[in-house]
Image (cartoon, rainbow, N blue to C red):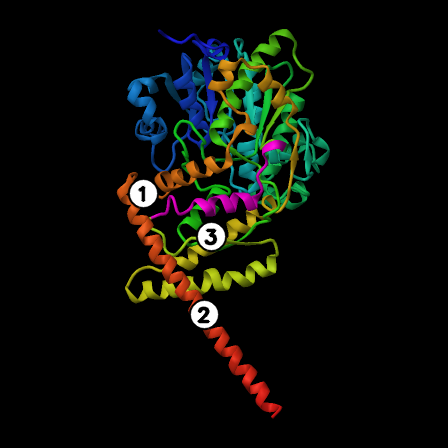
Amino acid sequence: MAKMATEMQRFYKDKVVFLTGGSGFLGKVTIEKLLRTTEVKRIYVLLRSKRGQEMKERCEAWEMDPVFDNLMKVDPDVLNRVVPLGGDCQEPDLGLSTSDRQVLVDEVQIVLHIAATVRFMEPLHIALAVNTRATRLMIQLAKEMPHLEAFVHVSTAYSNCVIENVSERFYPEHLTCPVQKVLELQESLSPEMLDSMAPALMGRYPNTYTYTKALAEQLLQQESGDLPICIFRPGVIIASYKEPMAGWIDNTNGPIAVLYGAAFGVLRITRLNVKAQAGIVPVDYCVNLVLTCAWNTARECVIKLPPEPPIYNLTPTDDNLITWGGFRDKAARLRCKYPLTKMMWMPFLHCTTTPWLFRFLVWFYHLLPGYAIDLVLRLRGRKPRMIKLYDKIHKNIDILAPFVDTTWHFDSSNTLKLWRSMSAGDQKLYDFDMGSIDWDDYFLQALSGIRIYLAKEEPGQETLDRAKKILRRFKFLHRLLQFTLCSGAAAILWSILMRIFGLFI
């Protein structure tokens, strides 16, 4: 007997969705969840050509993407409901053809604007085009859609990172220049000139990502008009907890890079405030809230249009917080369960918040071993790579430093109210209750996912047993190295003390 559809499932039945950012981490999981749990009629996805792959080729490649594995086993034709449209958020008109634009205007009922460049140090002219101007273009397109029921704009909880207590409201007062003026500058100045003005325009914002996301929010506040629209602000999006499979991850952005580097035994020292709260959110919880926001926006805007787009923050709740120290320690306790066969040394990670101490310790933990390995590689006739790798790692650590050194407090009243308004069936199907996450269990799943989906290790007990054997060997070598270094240091200290003592005799 077929299960009765929930209220949200009935809402999505036969709907036409337009989604940007479909090739990204959050976008792919959103598409998978829509296809698996609803009977949407069609999902239009804005895709651009990339790395020599045409837009249709990129979409067809999804059939081989692990994120759709379980879905394809149940329904091999499921991706037929996904229709790629050629376009690019960096283009002045989203890169849409006239005919494709008309199709969207005529058919779309739900817009999910997920696309963004998440590179923190993206040149300002690119970040502005993708994160801010594209939002204006999406608003203009949505205003032409006669059947539009809901528009969800995905922002970030750190769009207002210049303050430490963030409510679910707009903060235009922190911008040095109104968004309209900034976009006018973009139109009138060369990219080089605009990029040179970045420090003055950004003010206290630490990077172009958070700055252009804040500008996009001001656009939505001022230009959304009578659109049925809302803003979703997730924290740092990390590997899935449960769906589409436990521990799913396809990128090394953000703090997952720390676990990944440490698992290989390459990253041994980093800048991290172990007492600061970690605003991390599993990707499947983000997807569930995105879909719930669309349903709720359509439902509420039929009754009464709010004066401003409502905002929904999603970060760990006050009764289930996790610090960056907890993030590190939980991962460390579980690393023996899912080690990597490709590890280069025993995984361990030390943390400091002091910049000069970090730069000093980097020499001993990273650079000296890196130069030694590169020397061996050169002697073997191979290309050196460790110092180049460490240079990239250290730049990323510096970029992430402000976000792992500060505790932000995010109010989530709207999100909590939305959760309580859902039926029990929808709460189970579209779970985003951050208070229910078992962080120990989460990290067990995440480390397993890192091993399979990022490190590309073969699943199965045989590979795991081999990795554990390698880990035991590196543990022995690590202890031996520690003993040798400590013995050498003790011998040098003893020799110095004897010489000093001899001067007094």
Q: Nearer the viewer, residue 475 or 301?
A: 475
Which residue is drawn at the image coordinates 61% and 22% (left, top)?
Answer: 416
| Residue 470 locus on image (x, y percent) | 32, 53
Query: What residue type is disc 1 on?
Result: Glu
Secondary structure of residue under mark 1: loop
Relative to residue 299, is residue 267 depicted above or below?
Answer: below
Q: Is residue 275 magenta?
A: no
Q: Residue furthest bottom?
A: 505
Relative to residue 63, is residue 368 depicted above or below?
Answer: below
Q: Nearer the viewer, residue 280 or 346?
A: 346
List the residue tagged with mark 2: 485
- Residues in magenta? 318-340
List the residue tagged with mark 1: 457
Within 10 angstroms of label 1, few (less than 14), some, or many (20 or more) residues? some
Looking at the magenta stretch, what is its main secondary structure? helix
Q: Quadrant of residue 129?
A: top right
Secondary structure of residue under mark 2: helix
**Front disc: 1 or 2:** 2
Image quadrant where one finds the C terminus: bottom right
